[in-house]
Image (spheres, rainbow, N blue to C red):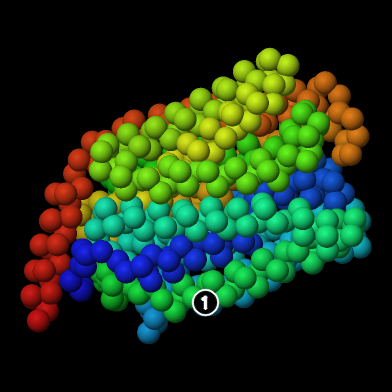
Amino acid sequence: MSTTPTGKTSYTTRLSYASSDVACQLVFAPISFYLLKFYTDVFGLAAGVAGTIMLVARFVDAADAPIWGIVFERTKSRWGKIRPWFLWLCGPFAIFGVLTFLTPDLSGTAKMLYAAGTYICANILYTGINTPVTAILAALTANPQERVVLTCFRMFGSKLGVLIVNLTAMWFVATLGGGDDRKGYMLTVPIYAVMAVVLFLLAFRNLKEVVRSEEKPKPVFKGFGALRGNWPWWIIASSSLLFWIAFISRVAAAPYFFEYTLGRKDLISFAFTLDFISLGTVLGLPWFCRIWSKTTVWAGGLVGLIVGQLVMAWGLAHGNSLPIIMTGWALGFLASGAAMAMPFSVISDSVDFGEWKTGIRAAGLLAAIGAAFCLKAGAGLGGALPGWILQSTGYVANVVQTPAVLRGIELSVVWVPAVAFAAALVPVLFYRKFERLEPQIRDELELRRAAVNKGGA
């Protein structure tokens, strides 16, 4: 093991770390925000079929997260364990992101299989390239406060990528397609894909793994030992799963909500660009975490999301009041910055806890399951639920919707997320006792590593 660096990271490292998640979102944000409506209104799939494809695909993909984790733990290259995956996977990820939005002239089963196949491959590759973004954090610095700073840069990059997509996607589709949305998507997504490849290569060039543990590959299943008694990790994983169910249900149902419930299709892009205000809490995280505990900040974000959902419900109850609804929608995005960023930050602390408790450091595996698996499984359920609800209420694309469908849209965009955000809050309330152990864990791990280095000298 090498000596554990505890100092500040350079701005080159911070900005390169941010660029890795800009790249991820340039390809994946179109899938997260627009794919359900693309499937139903452009590709011509039934809402229930589209929802089922999204669920099955995400769970197939979620199941590969542990496999990716094992692969990362056993990777050995001259560039490190985690970093080379930016180089190896950026091209395939970009290609399947493009294929997901193509509309070949197919019908029936062939159409469903194409949609499912391209979506599954895009998700598997997203896990393969996004998990390293999380896992490499533990290798960039051992300083918990610096990890919060790096997470802020990462989340800035993520939100910037989402903002770029939401500011330009519908304009590109309309302009490049000339009124033909199929052609518009076919020409738009490759633009984002090329940008993503360039940014991944920048991250590969500049990020260095300076915190290392075992150089020899561990037995395949040994890494799972880091989960034994690792209660901080279990808290992070369960809360993250519920958060992503809520968040993706909210955004997947939003295009239907603004078009059919509010009659303001013109507001869809603007509503999604409001995601950028979450940086108000993301960029304040280092300051917030100096004043309050990380547990308090994390829980506060989830409480803010619940309040935002209730404000939206209040606006609907008052004659679909657009000012009230948009206030709740914006409040939810503002609070989501803390609720989304904190798990990515503390997952590295759970890696330290696992090493401290079991002697096994499994950053790739814990990040793959605790972050990628939960994101994918949660997003699969969050994307499927609106599709199933719309199907059960009789949704038909591009027509005036019945009262039953409108109630289903409200359920998908307001109440399903509200309940799931509340459930995500519960495990977080138990995290504080483990957060108090962090200074002790850090000091004891440094002593162990120093002893190993001395013994190996």
Please tell me which residue is depicted at 8% across the width and 76% down the height of the picture.
455
Residue 317 in which image quadrant: top right
Please tell me which residue is depicted at 79% across the width and 50% down the height of the picture.
38
Please tell me which residue is depicted at 37% across the width and 77% down the height of the picture.
80
Is residue 381 at least partly visible in the picture?
Answer: no
Q: Residue furthest front?
A: 323
| 115 vs 313: above or below | below
Residue 213 in which image quadrant: bottom left
Give the secondary structure at mark 1: helix
Q: Nearer the viewer, residue 61 or 38?
A: 38
Q: Nearer the viewer, residue 253 or 106?
A: 253
Q: Position of residue 186 (x, y in %)?
A: 80, 65
Please tell me which residue is depicted at 50% across the width and 52% down the height of the picture.
373
**Residue at mark 1:** 201
| 261 vs 436: above or below | above
Near mark 1 (Cα within 10 A), the count class, few <14, some 14-19 or many ≥20, is some
**Quadrant location of the N terminus?**
bottom left
Q: Position of residue 414 (x, y in %)?
A: 63, 27
